[in-house]
Amino acid sequence: MLNKKKAPPDPKQSKILSPKNGLDNFRLGFGMSPKCPAVYLKTFGCQMNIRDSEFVTGLLLDDGFRMVDSPEAADVIIFNSCSVRKHAEERLFGNICDLAGLKKKRPGLIIGLMGCTAQNYKDEALTKAPMLDFVCGTGNEKDLPQLVGDILKDRCRIVAADKVNEKKPEPMPEYREGTFKAYVAIGEGCDNFCSYCIVPYVRGRERSRRAEDIIKEVKDLAVRGFKEITLLGQNVNSYKLTANRSPLTAKTSDFVRLLEQINSIKGIERIRFMTSHPKDASVELFKAMRDLDKVCEHLHLPLQSGSDRILNKMSRGYTQKKYLELAGDYKKTLPEGSLTTDILVGFPSETEKDFKATVMVMEKVGFDSAFTFKYSPRPPARSCALKDDVKSEVKEKRLKTIIDIQCKISEVRNRALVGKTLEVLVDGHGGRDPHKLTGRTRTNKTAIFSGDGKLTGRSVNVKIGSVTPYALLGRMA
Ligand code: SF4
């Protein structure tokens, strides 16, 4: 039971502390009921945030908490946040503010914010959302159980966001959400400082995990029956090996060397990775993708813009020509491989000519799919100093144009697969038709087909009969 005698935190009298005490204090705060405190954790954002939520869930479970799947059943509600797009951030604060009623009914309820938005706003988040009890920055997540314990003990509000450049402790907790697919972070942070991006500020400077820690984690996952792993990093292909470097492969890039080592782990069937930066992508990487049997033939290579002028203002570190060369090399090396991208329209000063250059690159490359976004200034990113001068309706129109173009290209790319039989790792029932199975091809395309739910987690062959821009429809071969 929560201690309801104590007053809920008053924003005007909030104490800003560093976490210092453990679950013992938490238990004291609860009057030491044998019942484990219940936590509801809601995740927004990218794969890295999903992995961070798993990490924190593992810590909490190891520390005697239990997880629940509704805010109403929770003693502690945590939001793992994303700040990369303005829209996501607005939705996040909307969700937190929606809890005002619940907090009023149950003043002992603890509500916290972790992740990118927590790191970005720090104590300002307490003002933006007065019902928050704590703000836990990206590097402080390892202290989260202690932090909740401190709140229970002191009934104060806590902001812990002073460790943005720290590595997570090894070994990571064992907890995983799935049973056959897992994310494995190989590094965190970014040194690129693309002008529109806040990641280097909220995730800190680039730091790679030690190869032996990654290998051990993947081996453990393989023993537990996991078949597919996705290596994660803000800039995965700039991974820097800090151990296990063999003199035989000293000329090989560190990321390729890591792929080689993981490829030899028994039990793992598929290896994916994201996100790659064009300036660190190379023919050597594409050849490794071709030659290492478990590495899937899918590359996500963000283009952002096809205009050299805009790429320069974005500080992306490559030109249109360089990107087209890379895409050409990839397609030559892996003709059956898929290539996906991110595109950002409406960057400050983007003209119709700049936008047409982006469309030209899209058509020339023929991406399999694209994540498309409208620019919005994200403080403290450097582009905030530029006038956000592309009108909202122009951004909207450009976004719609590239979505329509990509839709057509995706359909053409998918149509080329009709009649082919592809290996699909089954995710289970889902999608629009709950009676159908869905799964992913090695090229990361969604396949939909009839089959038994018992096939979930297994690889099957599917003959493709028809397609949409978003999926391949077929039957088991
Ligand atoms: S490479 Fe650029 S866009 Fe990607 S995380 Fe780093 S700064 Fe952000």
Image (cartoon, grey):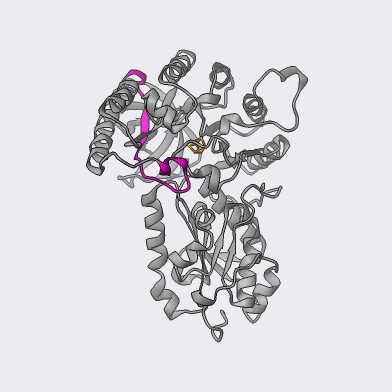
The foreground one among 116 and 409 is 116
Res 228 quadrant in image: top right
Please provide percent x and percent y for residue 375: 35, 41
User: In the shown orientation, is residue 314 left or right of residue 434?
Assistant: right
Identified at 58% across, 52% down, the residue is: 138
| Residue 227 appears left or right of 386 | right
Q: Is residue 33 visible?
A: no
Percent x, y of residue 356: 28, 24
Quadrant for residue 18, please give it.
bottom right
Q: At x 50% / y 77%, what residue is drawn? A: 10
Rendered position, 382 above or below 333: below
Quadrant of the snapshot with the C terminus:
top left
- The magenta stretch spans residue 88: no
Identify whether 195 is placed above or below 296.
below
- Which range is magenta? 364-385
Please state which of residues 359 and 264 is positioned toward the viewer in this rendering: 359
Question: In the rendered image of this protein, does residue 60 appear above or below residue 415?
Answer: below
User: Going by the picture, which residue comes out furthest to the top?
Assistant: 332
Give whichever of 58, 471 is nearer the camera.
Answer: 58
As rendered, which of 353 and 206 lies closer to the eye?
353
**In magenta segment, residue 371:** yes
Residue 200 drawn at (x, y percent): 55, 42
Which quadrant does the N terminus fall into? bottom right
